[in-house]
Image (spheres, coloured by chain):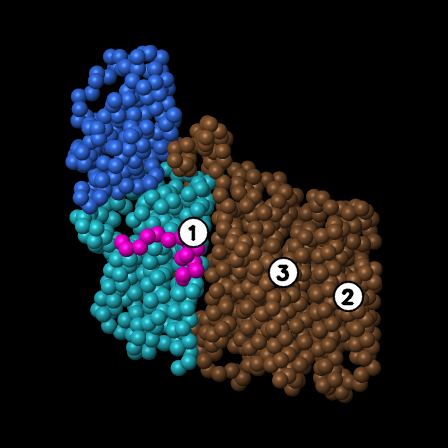
């Protein structure tokens, strides 16, 4: 049964996607998209509830993955040729050469029975995230793309292509996290790169093309690193399986895979492609570039964690992650473009996950798990809210997002929920940060960078939250008009964020810590790290819940007592205009009416992109090179 | 005990066309030599935090609106103290074309402090009297009207002119009624 | 291990007692300030009279959500107090305190008042300045005692001041920010009611300003407790240290001018962080 479910999860979306591509009518396309979303989510939920904890699929022949792999390489070369992108073309050719070598290299006999797909708890969590969050984003995309302005020269056909790639991507991502055979992994890895390329370039504007080129450059580089690691592993007699890499006696393939993971997750110094990808339509950002595709990189890091745990490679990985966290949080402080802030925040959270995985402690591993789950849900939610906001106010700038509570209360409240979930206890992301700080105590430099980064994350979230909650008094609010697919998906994700957030701590105790124990068996760890894992059990959650309930109840009561007579205007030294529509108008010279506005602090000279990347990129590059240096020298 | 404004009267100060003499004297009261803080008086920056609005200067057309704005933003119970000769009647500027002639033309006043400028002792006396108004009348009306005391003999007010904010919002009425600028009785 | 009922009782007692301690400290603060300035000063219970008066004022506001943020600010401070008294995880306490400050920041930004918004931006800068140092204080305590729980603070048997001297100085800088005293009283000053017209709290009036004042009592009490915890092995000496530190804060409040947020940020991230990191290096190197 498990194998059938896995096939549905991987091949299902791809088949639905092909259907969407071939079907001309819009209604049929919408129906197929919604069906794909429903089927994928249902399969994933069914698997998690009634499936086993572990499963394998063995394939008798390697024909299908090899075919897929060559198809992807051919596609990369074709893109390199037709877009006149020499670097991509060259890398595609190199990958083809490596593919040929891998075809004909002999494999050690004991590797003949390695499974094609392996399904365990880590894969399950990622499949769940991809399928459920991905399904909701697909539903949202149906409504969003209807209103999207750039339909390209072909209009309807473009939409078909868009939804083909978006839906097929779900299947490719599921396949990626379930793959054990490196052929499948490499094929799906390149498939996600290609989906990303076409989706980023959907609008066909010069900026979109440029961003797509940047994205495919860096991601194909990552794919090449992945293939190199595979080649080294085969040369060392490991065969084609991912799971046995951890028991191999060499760390070199792991180092290559680490670089591949860092390119996919847009870590520094590879972050520029994700920033450029923000030009894509928002469902693309929500699906690929926050909750799913970039998770492929951290998934790989977590998969390899037992392999490099405790080694110097792990130390460098943790340092690289922590440094990325600090630098991208600083970069986010200097941005006023909302999507760029979200992008930098995504990279920062992924960096934190990588740092936690690199710390090689069970508590760190558990924290990484926690962060993956909650970050994916919350960031997906924030991106789709950002899409709705952007369509409503016509701007992505944070400084334009005031007074939204009057224009669109529903969206604003959900956006606020998303931002609080990134910022406050007892929600999961903050819980993850808390555990990360505690477990980083044993690595001082990592700890310092995580602490500085955390302080910086608060800055940009507080600024943005403050801007969104700005509202004058209104007697009543009217909900805005949104297509049900958009409001439904936002509401569903919002409720998921709230519920999972409130129960983050019990979820952590019941599901995630046992996983960490499985991944880090007792014999390989010292007592100290296990004692720390047990410390979290004595944390009391009842004060928070009690107070939260008290607060919500009393505040709702107080809200009802507010009426027009109690409202005053802001203090503007008495120069308020009393008969105007806006409460924040004042009279300046010559009795002229002016509106009082103030911007937040951005510190472009300190936290701006140019200043920070000028010092952060070289340091990050040095750390990436050290990945190889510490194991080779 | 709740609402004990008499123990913690916070003042906000507004200068309506004053020569700054009264302002300097008021600030002098907050200095160590005279120390208004021993009565719990704090000089706050904005009307929303204040209980007493201390107005100096003879109000003119330009800042009547501003004074009204500041007064409206004060939450009750609130009092108004008009400082100096200018604040009471317009002082030596009462005949000027732009001067309305005293704070009570715009907002209801509870305590007048005479002097040009009033000595710090007189200011302290005025503040204490203002505070005593609360002690004298626990159900103090938020509009600052119930029990009012004056330290000077006011010129007989025109009985037909009620001192309410609504009437005070038309400051030019006075001007047209009496071209000399003098208050008629 | 205490039973749940005992925990609830202890938490309630602490939550009711802390504002009293805070109010008393603020009263003494005002009197000492006054005497330093050759004045008489208000009566000792003046902060209580202030809050009582504010509670009796008419309720005015700019929008509904101001209420929410004021209460959030107070509630999370109460929660932090309860957690401290119950000896819970110190990093979690720091995070709860951060939430409380964020609630205040949002309260300042949710209204369309330029002064309020500037105050909030400055408060964000203040948070950025002192958060790393507070976390390093907790890490330093962990390195001394081997535990993140507040109830294990005396586990090592020696007072924290001896193992964390530099962090103590850095914490004195943080105290100036938390108590809203010069040179760091930028967002809303304790005594300077005119600085950007009281900044964040400008649009709060009456009972909701009273809520913010009571929250500040909690903050004062918490700061005092942390200062005293630097000699947790003998609480009498700890309280003495706390009193002396508080006196130093008042002294510097009267000596220093208010400085800019750029100066505060650069000063805290160089001097403050430098002191803390050096101290931690000593502890790691043992």
Seen in the image, is C131 located left or right of residue B113? right
Closer to viewer: mark 1 or mark 3: 1
**Cβ atoms at labels 2 and 1 below 8 Å apart:** no
Distance Cα–Cα, label 3 vs label 2: 26 Å
- Label for residue C245? none
Q: Which chain is brown?
A: A
Subunit under mark 2: A
Q: Colour of chain B?
A: blue
Q: Which residue is mark 2?
A: A88
Distance Cα–Cα, label 1 vs label 3: 33 Å
Label 3: state its secondary structure: helix
Nearest the eye: A397 or C267: C267
Q: Quadrant of residue A623?
A: bottom right
Q: Which residue is mark 1?
A: C122
Label 1: state its secondary structure: helix
Q: Colour of chain C?
A: cyan
Nearest the eye: A71 or A624: A624
**Cβ atoms at labels 3 and 2 below 8 Å apart:** no
Q: Quadrant of residue B13?
A: top left
Q: Which residue is mark 3?
A: A291
Q: Position of residue C279 (x, y in %)?
A: 38, 73
Label 2: state its secondary structure: helix
Nearest the eye: A26 or A169: A169
Subunit under mark 3: A
Task: Mark yes or no: residue C230 visible.
Answer: yes
What's the residue at 73%, 46% (across, down)? A150
Extent of the magenta region:
C254-268
Seen in the image, is A487 located left or right of residue C229? right
Residue neighbourhood size for the residue with mark 2, other residues' Cα within 10 Å, grouped as few (<14), some (14–19), many (≥20): many
What's the residue at 31%, 55% (across, down)? C256
């Amino acid at each position: 049964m498990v194998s059938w479910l896995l096939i549905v999860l991987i091949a299902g979306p791809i088949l639905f996607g092909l259907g969407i591509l071939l079907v001309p009518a819009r209604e049929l396309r919408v129906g197929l998209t919604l069906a794909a979303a429903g089927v994928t989510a249902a399969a994933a939920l069914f698997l998690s509830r009634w499936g086993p904890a572990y499963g394998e699929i063995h394939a008798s022949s390697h024909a299908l993955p090899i075919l897929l792999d060559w198809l992807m390489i051919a596609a990369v070369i074709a893109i390199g040729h037709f877009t006149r992108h020499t670097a991509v073309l060259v890398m595609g050719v190199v990958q083809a050469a490596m593919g040929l070598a891998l075809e004909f290299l002999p494999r050690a006999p004991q590797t003949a029975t390695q499974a094609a797909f392996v399904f365990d708890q880590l894969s399950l969590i990622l499949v769940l995230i991809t399928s459920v969050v991905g399904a909701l984003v697909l539903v949202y995309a149906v409504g969003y793309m209807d209103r999207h302005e750039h339909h390209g020269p072909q209009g309807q056909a473009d939409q078909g292509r868009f939804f083909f790639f978006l839906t097929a991507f779900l299947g490719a991502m599921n396949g990626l996290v379930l793959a054990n055979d490196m052929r499948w992994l490499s094929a799906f890895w390149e498939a996600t790169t290609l989906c990303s390329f076409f989706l980023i370039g959907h609008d066909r504007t010069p900026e979109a093309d440029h961003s797509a080129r940047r994205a495919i450059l860096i991601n194909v580089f990552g794919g090449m690193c992945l293939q190199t690691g595979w080649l080294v592993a085969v040369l060392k007699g490991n065969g084609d399986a991912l799971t046995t890499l951890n028991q191999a006696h060499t760390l070199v393939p792991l180092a290559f895979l680490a670089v591949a993971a860092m390119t996919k997750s847009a870590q520094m110094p590879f972050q520029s492609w994700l920033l450029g990808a923000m030009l894509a339509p928002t469902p693309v950002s929500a699906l690929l570039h926050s909750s799913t595709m970039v998770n492929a990189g951290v998934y790989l890091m977590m998969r390899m964690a037992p392999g490099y745990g405790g080694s110097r490679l792990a130390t460098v990985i943790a340092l690289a992650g922590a440094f990325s966290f600090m630098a991208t949080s600083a970069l986010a402080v200097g941005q006023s473009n909302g999507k760029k802030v979200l992008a930098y925040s995504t990279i920062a959270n992924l960096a934190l996950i990588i740092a936690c995985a690199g710390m090689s402690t069970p508590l760190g591993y558990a924290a990484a798990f926690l962060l993956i789950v909650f970050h994916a849900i919350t960031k997906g939610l924030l991106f789709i809210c950002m899409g709705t906001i952007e369509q409503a106010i016509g701007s992505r700038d944070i400084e334009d997002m005031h007074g939204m509570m009057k224009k669109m209360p529903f969206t604003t409240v959900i956006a606020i929920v998303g931002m609080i979930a990134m910022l406050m206890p007892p929600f999961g992301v903050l819980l993850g940060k808390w555990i990360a700080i505690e477990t980083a105590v044993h690595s001082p430099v990592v700890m310092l960078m995580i602490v500085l980064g955390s302080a910086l994350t608060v800055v940009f979230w507080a600024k943005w939250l403050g801007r969104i909650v700005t509202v004058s008094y209104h007697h009543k609010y009217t909900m805005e008009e949104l297509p049900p697919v958009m409001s439904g998906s936002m509401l569903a994700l919002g409720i998921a964020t709230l519920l999972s957030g409130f129960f983050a701590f019990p979820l952590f105790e019941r599901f995630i810590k046992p996983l960490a124990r499985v991944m880090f068996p007792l014999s390989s760890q010292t007592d100290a790290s296990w004692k720390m894992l047990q410390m979290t059990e004595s944390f009391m959650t009842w004060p928070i819940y009690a107070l939260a309930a008290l607060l919500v109840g009393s505040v709702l009561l107080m809200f009802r007592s507010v009426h027009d007579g109690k409202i005053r205007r802001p203090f503007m030294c008495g120069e308020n205009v009393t008969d105007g529509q806006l409460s924040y108008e004042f009279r300046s010279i010559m009795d002229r009416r002016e509106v009082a506005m103030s911007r937040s602090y951005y510190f472009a000279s300190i936290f701006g992109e140019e200043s920070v990347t000028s010092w952060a990129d070289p340091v990050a590059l040095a750390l990436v090179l050290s990945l190889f240096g510490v194991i080779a020298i | 005990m709740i609402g004990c404004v008499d123990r913690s009267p916070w003042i906000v100060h507004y200068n309506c066309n004053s020569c700054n003499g009264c302002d300097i004297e008021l600030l002098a009261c907050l200095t160590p030599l005279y120390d208004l803080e021993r009565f719990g008086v704090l000089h706050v920056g904005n009307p929303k935090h204040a209980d007493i609005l201390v107005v100096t200067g003879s109000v003119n057309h330009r800042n009547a609106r501003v004074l009204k704005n500041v007064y409206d933003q004060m939450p009750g119970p609130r009092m108004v103290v008009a400082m100096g000769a200018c604040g009471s009647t317009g002082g030596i500027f009462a005949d000027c074309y732009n001067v309305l002639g005293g704070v009570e033309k715009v907002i209801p006043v509870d305590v007048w402090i005479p002097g040009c400028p009033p000595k710090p002792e007189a200011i302290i006396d005025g503040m204490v009297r203002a505070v005593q108004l609360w002690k004298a009348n626990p159900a103090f009306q938020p509009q600052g009207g119930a029990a009012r005391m004056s330290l000077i003999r006011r010129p007989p007010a025109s009985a037909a002119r009620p001192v309410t904010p609504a009437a005070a919002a038309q400051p030019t009425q006075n001007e047209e009624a009496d071209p000399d600028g003098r208050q008629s009785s | 291990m205490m039973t749940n009922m005992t925990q609830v009782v202890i938490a309630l007692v602490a939550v009711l007692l802390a504002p009293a301690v805070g109010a008393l400290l603020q009263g003494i603060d005002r009197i000492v300030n006054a005497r330093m300035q050759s004045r008489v000063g208000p009566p000792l219970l003046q902060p209580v009279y202030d809050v009582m008066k504010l509670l009796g004022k008419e309720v005015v506001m700019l929008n509904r959500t101001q209420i929410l943020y004021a209460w959030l600010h107070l509630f999370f401070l109460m929660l932090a107090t309860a957690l401290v008294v119950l000896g819970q995880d110190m990093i979690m306490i720091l995070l709860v305190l951060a939430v409380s400050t964020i609630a205040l920041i949002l309260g300042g930004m949710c209204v369309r008042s330029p002064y309020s918004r500037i105050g909030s931006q400055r408060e964000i800068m203040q948070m950025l300045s002192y958060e790393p140092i507070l976390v390093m204080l907790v890490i330093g305590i962990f390195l001394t005692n081997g535990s993140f729980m507040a109830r294990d603070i005396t586990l090592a048997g020696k007072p924290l001041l001896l193992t964390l001297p530099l962090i103590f100085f850095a914490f004195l800088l943080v105290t100036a920010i938390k108590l809203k005293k010069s040179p760091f009283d930028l967002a809303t000053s304790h005594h300077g009611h005119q600085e950007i017209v009281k900044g964040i709290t400008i649009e709060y009036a009456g009972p909701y300003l009273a809520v913010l004042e009571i929250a500040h009592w909690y903050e004062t009490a918490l700061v005092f407790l942390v200062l005293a915890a630097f000699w947790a092995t003998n609480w009498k000496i700890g309280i003495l240290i706390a009193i002396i530190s508080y006196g130093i804060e008042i002294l510097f409040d009267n000596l220093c001018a208010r400085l800019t947020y750029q100066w505060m940020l650069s000063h805290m991230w160089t001097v403050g962080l430098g002191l803390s990191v050096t101290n931690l290096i000593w502890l790691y190197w043992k």
